[in-house]
Amino acid sequence: MLEVAIMVEGQYGMNWPRWMRLGRAAEGLGYAGLYRSDHFTEPTGPYMDALELWSSLTWLADNTERIEFGPLVSPVSCGLEAIAGSMLPQP
């Protein structure tokens, strides 16, 4: 059986309301997975809403039951250290 998943570039206007609708719709419509990139902007613009990858996947984990998800592009060398650091457990 063929399984189809969706890959979303987060820098093209993705925000929380859109992500929540997309996550629920992808699962409800039977897609196998929903994957994201970790891009915040395009070097040449236009600059639009951009939802951070890891917190959006955390929401998906907590609010879906069967859909697979994860990062397909996560250029950690270009990431914001403050975001990565804030995800680490604190003593």
Image (cartoon, grey):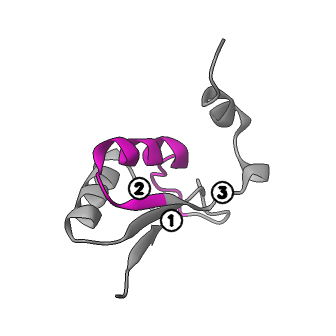
In this rendering, is residue 6 above or below 60? below
What's the amino acid at mark 3?
Ser
Could you tell me if residue 8 is visible in this image? yes
Q: Residue furthest top?
A: 91
Marks 2/1: CA–CA distance: 8 Å
Q: Position of residue 48 (x, y in %)?
A: 47, 56
The quadrant of the image that shows the C terminus is: top right
The quadrant of the image that shows the N terminus is: bottom left
In the image, what residue occupies the spot 63% across and 35% down? 83
What residue does disc 1 label? 9
Report crowding for label 1: few under 14, some 14 to 19, many 20 or more residues within 10 A (C-alpha). some
Marks 2/3: CA–CA distance: 16 Å
Tag 2–tag 1 contact (CB < 8 Å): yes
Report crowding for label 2: few under 14, some 14 to 19, many 20 or more residues within 10 A (C-alpha). some
In the image, what residue occupies the spot 74% across and 50% down? 76
Q: Where is residue 84 in the image (x, y as percent from the top left)?
A: 66, 36
Q: In which quarter of the image is residue 14?
A: bottom left
Marks 1/3: CA–CA distance: 11 Å
Q: Is mark 2 on a helix, strand or loop?
A: loop
**Among the two numbered marks 1 and 3 on one chain, the one whose residue lies closer to the N terminus:** 1
Q: In this view, does 31 lie to the left or right of 81?
A: left
Q: Front-most of 30 and 79?
A: 30
Q: Quadrant of residue 16?
A: top left
Q: Which of marks 1 and 3 is in front?
A: 3
What residue does disc 2 label? 14
What's the amino acid at mark 2?
Met
Q: Is residue 50 left or right of residue 86?
A: left
